[in-house]
Image: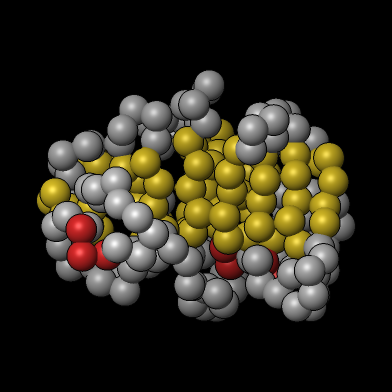
């Protein structure tokens, strides 16, 4: 089938986003709130502008896993893994709609129990799972608004109860899943009141 047009993420703003093509890893001092003058300089900068292996092009999100490795999604439709010193380890993904392909990858989670990597495939309306070497495992979810379906998922996390939590952005809701990705519940809908969500 013909591929859909590749679009930029509808809500690229996030505390993990960056408009530059490198990721700065900052060591912060223990300071009082808003005492920004005591924030230390970056320990190192990893990546440089480009689309080759080890380079980054408009990174969209990143996470630091339980091995202290840093995983970065960028607009070359891939995920790159760096060690704690900023040295590239591996990258995986390409542009498209098939397995191991992305239409703007965004949020990343590394499961500390299984080492599985979960990537929000933002504009393909799904989450993809990979092993720690970047090999494709499975697709989670499909486009839609029913329980377990997604429209532009942007972030995925594990909560204190060991449940997966997904911001289902264009459905204006948060979805929660158990360890086997069975839907538990959803909450929120469009709006700006305390129980509503606008592009979570």
Pick whichever, 140 or 85, lies toward us. 85
Name the spot of residue 29 as percent of width and height, x first.
24, 48
| Left or right of residue 181, residue 111 in this image | left
Pick whichever, 52 or 169, lies toward us. 169
Pick whichever, 62 or 51, lies toward us. 62
Query: Measured along the vertical axis of the image, is residue 76 above or below residue 9?
Result: above
In which quadrant of the rendered image does the N terminus lie? bottom right
Name the spot of residue 112 as percent of width and height, x first.
49, 26
- The residue positioned 67% from the left and 45% from the top of the image is 165
Query: Measured along the vertical axis of the image, is residue 150 above or below residue 29?
Result: below
| Left or right of residue 19, residue 52 in this image | left
Name the spot of residue 23 as percent of width and height, x first.
25, 58
* Residue farthest along the top direction in this orientation: 113
Residue 90 visible somewhere in the drawing: no
Query: Measured along the vertical axis of the image, is residue 67 above or below residue 40?
Result: above
- The residue positioned 55% from the left and 74% from the top of the image is 11
Pick whichever, 25 or 178, lies toward us. 25
Residue 200 visible somewhere in the drawing: yes
């Amino acid at each position: 089938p013909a591929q859909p047009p590749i679009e930029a993420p509808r809500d690229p703003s996030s505390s993990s986003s960056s408009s530059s093509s490198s990721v700065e890893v900052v060591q912060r001092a223990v300071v009082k709130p808003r005492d920004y003058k005591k924030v230390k300089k970056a320990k190192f900068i990893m990546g440089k502008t480009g689309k080759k292996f080890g380079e980054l092009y408009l990174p969209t999100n990143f996470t630091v896993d339980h091995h202290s490795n840093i995983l970065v999604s960028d607009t070359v439709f891939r995920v790159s893994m760096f060690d704690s010193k900023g040295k590239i380890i591996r990258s995986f993904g390409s542009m498209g709609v098939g397995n191991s392909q992305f239409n703007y990858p965004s949020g990343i989670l590394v499961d500390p129990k299984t080492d599985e990597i979960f990537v929000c495939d933002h504009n393909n309306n799904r989450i993809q799972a990979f092993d720690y070497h970047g090999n494709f495992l499975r697709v989670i979810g499909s486009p839609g608004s029913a329980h377990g379906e997604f429209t532009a998922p942007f972030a995925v996390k594990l909560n204190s109860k060991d449940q997966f939590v997904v911001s289902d952005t264009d459905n204006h809701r948060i979805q929660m899943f158990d360890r086997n990705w069975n839907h538990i519940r959803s909450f929120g809908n469009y709006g700006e009141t305390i129980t509503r969500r606008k592009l979570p």
